[in-house]
Amino acid sequence: MILLNYFKTGITSLKINKSRSFLTILGIVIGIAVVIVIVSISQGAKNLILNQIKSIGADVITIRPGRTPKGMSDVGGVMLSNSLKEKDIQALSDKRNIPEIVDIAPSVLVPGGVATGKERFEAMVLGWSAEWLAKMFDIYPERGSLFGEQEIKERAKVAVIGSRVKKELFGDDDALNKKIRIKGKKFRIIGILPPKGQVSMFNLDDIVLIPYSTAQKDILGIDYYREVLVKVKDEQSVPLVVEEIKRVLRNQHKITDPSKDDFHIMTQADMAQRINVITRVLSLLLLSVAGISLIVGGIGIMNIMLVSVTERTREIGLRKAVGATNKDILYQFLAETILLTSLGGIIGIILGLFFSFIISLILSRLIGYTWPFSFSLWAVIVGLIVSGVVGLIFGLYPAKKAAEKNPIEALRYE
């Protein structure tokens, strides 16, 4: 009951100076709101990326050339590596080597855009398997058809284009069987995809899909692949197949020391783990910035409370004269500070959640697909605890100053 009285008296004191009380907690409000926004947006980003990764399928394994990148210095080496070649695809496709592999599809990214006689569009030109794209993302041409293994073997100059590519190059005209140019080579459009937007790492509306053999040999003039996707019979087979892929590729490349692998393998679980680490590090960096705001807000509260102690010197003297102890005065000012910061924390949480929701809507419109709004209960709880702790820490010194005042000198204060 005594503690409740401290808070009741504190509420009365704060009501007397409403404007000053609000300005006092502004730093805390901003700090807590920023914490909530950072946690919500980073969690939303992580969920978005993980959902995109999962859409590829947990039974898909990605093989890339070059050793596993351990830093920015390794990225260039990976981009320039030419270790994955046709003989590797044939070895991995051989059921006698890895019977658990269901399908395999290499891919090649072709830089630059596409053009017609007058128009040009910076599309993503991908040499891949059209059947893989259709099955993986459940998208099939609304007009025309996909190319198959026969076109890949013949290195046919055919293309399947996304809806935006069609609109940018041909407008409302029919694009089927029309020609487009890629790196000076003419390709016949055999299929037009329906609007789909962003799926996984691809914007399917901006894609131009051509046979990977054509992209590799006829456009880029290379004998290697940038990426190979392997589909296994089920998710449980993934760890076993990963080890078998390593064994086959090491035999192909005459590698006896695993530390000298000229390829690296990624599963969906590996990608998810890396995304978790990256978002966690970024969140901690951003939260440290928000922590500075909370410290600044706490210093502001301490300064205001010191001013309040000076203004209420006669009140402190009067209370001590009628029997209040130093502990009573200390607890009274601490209660006021904790009330202020807790109120700031609550307002900050409400504003943080509101702005997080608004930002998620804005990002969804900007990037063209749903950015999930994430409500983090632990962030709300931490926000309330932190605001209370800030009040306790930064209110202790002013409260102690108030408690130590001499009652006689305090009563004489003008």
Image: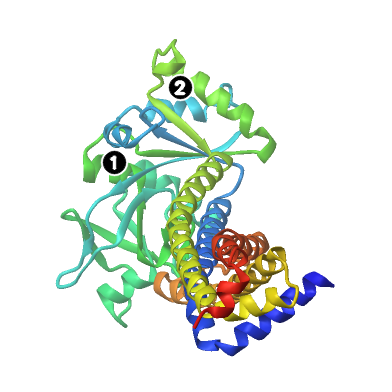
Q: Amino acid at mark 1?
A: Gln
Kindly indicate the quadrant of the structure image that contains residue 177. bottom left
Judging by the rendered image, the residue that carries numbered circle 1 is 216
Q: x and y percent of residue 213 in the render?
A: 33, 42
Give the side of residue 316 with respect to residue 68, left or right. Answer: right
Q: How is the image coloured?
A: rainbow
Place of residue 77 in the rendered image (x, y in percent of width and height, measured from the top left): 28, 31
Give the secondary structure at mark 2.
Answer: helix
Q: Residues within 10 Å of mark 1 (few under 14, many from 20)?
A: many
Nearer the N terminus, badge 1 or badge 2?
Answer: 1
Locate residue 293, reporting x and y percent: 44, 63
Q: Is residue 188 left or right of residue 144?
A: left
Residue drawn at 60 percent across, 63 percent down: 404
Q: Quadrant of the N terminus?
A: bottom right
Query: Which is nearer the eye, 59 or 303?
Result: 303
**Mark 1 or 2, closer to the camera:** 2
Q: Position of residue 261 (x, y in %)?
A: 41, 21
Relative to 38, 391 lies left or right: right
Q: Which residue is mark 2?
A: 249
Q: CA distance from mark 1 to mark 2?
A: 21 Å
Relative to 117, residue 257 above or below: above
